[in-house]
Image (cartoon, grey):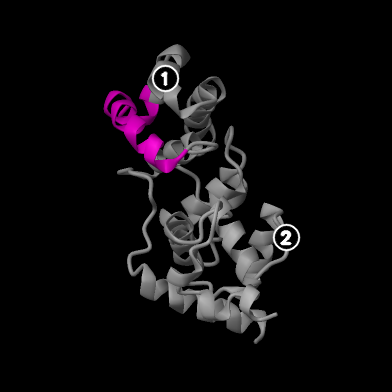
Amino acid sequence: MTKKELALKSVEALKQSYPEAICSLDYENPLELLIATRLSAQCTDARVNLVTPALFSKYRTLDDYCNADVKDIETIIHSCGFYHGKSRDIIGIAQKIKSDFGGKVPDSIEKLTSLPGVGRKTANLIMGDVFGAPSSVVTDTHLIRIANRIGLVNTKDPRKVEDELRKLLPPDESNDFCHRCVLHGRAVCTARKADCEKCSLDSFCKKNLK
């Protein structure tokens, strides 16, 4: 089986297991998703979703964030960890969106990664979920782990994983596949132990093809 064939089988198997390929973060607009994703760095999505209701109810507009007191945001997001840097980045993101991008979340990887604290993983998520861009590959830890375990890639370098999967996955399936890998990585193919008996990828997993 070629890697491209393996990718297609994986896409279909996870589609059956997780029909709704949805982002785990709660948000109502592109800016909120961008902020929630920044908060999710080294923090669980579940924790972020407990924190953002208070943040989003107090800070409703781009200008609210531009004019925010960093200490106030730190207090609200404290439990997400690394709150000093995340608070500075949230304000910096808003200010740069206003000054450089006309007040709108930008629509390219290059522009998004120019924002404070925004890397390629976040940029790809925004491109896929907000703008529906094809071939968006979000290199979450779950995606990297599963792609390695089933044999799609043989590297843990996020940029290399992104580049390799972009060549293998159907462009219109890439973003949803990444969301499904997150769901699968939490429910079945966990970091601690893979529950192979419950895994929809088990029949063609690398461990069974040696």
Q: Is residue 198 visible from the viewing direction of this image?
A: yes
* CA–CA distance in space, label 1 to label 2: 37 Å
Residue 183: x and y, percent? 42, 58
Q: Which residue is mark 2?
A: 155
Determine which quarter of the picture holds residue 204: bottom right
Q: Residues within 10 Å of mark 2 (few under 14, many from 20)?
A: some
Magenta-drawn stretch, dominant element (helix, strand or loop): helix
Q: Tell me the tag on residue 106.
A: none
Residue 104 horizontal side relative to residue 57, left or right: right
Query: Going 56% across and 44% down the picture, which residue do you hit?
Result: 112
- Give the residue drawn at x 45%, y 78%: 12
- The residue tagged with tag 1: helix, strand or loop? helix
Q: Residues within 10 Å of mark 1 (few under 14, many from 20)?
A: many
Please provide percent x and percent y for residue 28.
Answer: 30, 44
Residue visible at 29% across and 23% down? 58
Q: Where does residue 19 sit, x and y in percent of width and height?
A: 33, 70
Q: What amino acid type should be assigned to the residue bearing mark 1?
A: Ile
Q: Quadrant of residue 144?
A: bottom right
Q: Amino acid at mark 2?
A: Thr
Asked whether residue 53 is drawn in magenta, I would say yes
| Residue 104 in view of the camera | no
* Circle 2 SS class: loop
Indicate yes or no whether the magenta region holds residue 184: no
Which residues lie in the magenta part?
Answer: 44-64
- The N terminus lies in which quarter of the figure? bottom right
Marks 1, 2: nearer the viewer: 2
Q: Is residue 67 above or below residue 151?
A: above
Asked if residue 203 is positioned above or below residue 104 in the image, the reply reads below
Question: Which of 120 and 94 lies nearest the eye of the viewer?
Answer: 120
Which residue bears the numbered disc 1? 73
Image quarter in which the C terminus is found = bottom right
Q: Earlier in the sequence, mark 1 or mark 2?
A: 1
